[in-house]
Image (cartoon, rainbow, N blue to C red):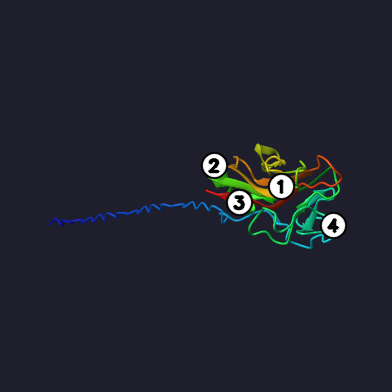
Amino acid sequence: MTSSTTSSSTTTSSTTSTTTTSTTTTTTSTTTTATTTAAFNINLVTNGDAETGSCQVSGGVTSPVGWNYNGPITQVIYNNPTSGCMTSSDPGPSDRGQCYFYGQQSTSTSMWQTINLTNEVSPLLIDNQSVKFNLSAWVGGYSNQDDTAVVSVTFNDANNTMTGNITSIGPVYAVDRSSMTSFIFQQANDFVPIGARSMTVFVTLTRSQGTGNQGSVDDIAVILYQ
């Protein structure tokens, strides 16, 4: 008798599934531009009308408030019987106040102030040459004398180096005033030069004859515009 044995073999197949996750990282870059609210069409000159502080009512010296100065340049009241040459009825600004700037007893005297443009307008606008300026003042003198006033503006870059040209108004001579004691309106305009970050307004009053310096100026203004 023969015995037969059957062997059964079972094979189990194991499958491993690998899942790969791909992660994409997105970086967003944000650029922030600092802007300055533009001070267009307003006078940037401090005390350009000689109305800040007191004014000389006799023969002394009252130095201009808000300006650096050299010599006895004086804020003097109109109709001063002792010092100055202008009366409130002499030809001049219709909106004049009580006072103006006068050369007092000097051969030459001056005042100046520097204005930071970056506080007033974006440097990007300046460097794109889209900003203009207007310099103006009422400039005058006494009768047939040629004592004069000159107002100028210069621009400096961030390194305090002059950029662009000097722009000046005045002088006004006796012949320009028909030998009348009077003011004459003067103005000039141009583009603010590329790179300008500040400007300096400079006033010089010069005597040509006599003992008093009758060079006079009022309502000094610099405005920016587009």
Asked whether, in this view, residue 176 is left or right of residue 206, the answer is: left
- The dot on residue 82 is 4
Q: Nearer the viewer, mark 3 or mark 1?
A: 1
Residue drawn at 69 percent across, 42 percent down = 170
The residue under label 1 is 180
Please tell me how crowded label 1 is: few (under 14), some (14-19), or many (20+) other residues with Cα within 10 Å: some
Q: CA distance from mark 2 to mark 4?
A: 48 Å
Please tell me how crowded label 4 is: few (under 14), some (14-19), or many (20+) other residues with Cα within 10 Å: few
Q: Is residue 159 above or below residue 17?
A: above
Residue 222 locus on image (x, y percent): 63, 50
Q: Is residue 5 above or below residue 178?
A: below
Compare marks 4 and 1 and give the one earlier in the sequence. Answer: 4
Residue 44 locus on image (x, y percent): 65, 54
SS at mark 2 in the image = loop
Q: Nearer the viewer, mark 2 or mark 4?
A: 4
Q: Nearer the viewer, mark 3 or mark 4?
A: 4
- The dot on residue 129 is 2
Compare marks 3 and 4 and give the one earlier in the sequence. Answer: 4
Q: Quadrant of residue 155?
A: top right
Residue drawn at 65 percent across, 52 percent down = 221
Compare marks 2 and 4 and give the one earlier in the sequence. Answer: 4
Q: CA distance from mark 1 to mark 2?
A: 41 Å
Q: CA distance from mark 4 to mark 1?
A: 19 Å
Amino acid type, callout 3 = Ile
The residue under label 3 is 223
Q: Is there CB contact under 8 Å for labels 3 and 1?
A: no
SS at mark 4 in the image = loop
Q: Is residue 153 above or below residue 32?
A: above
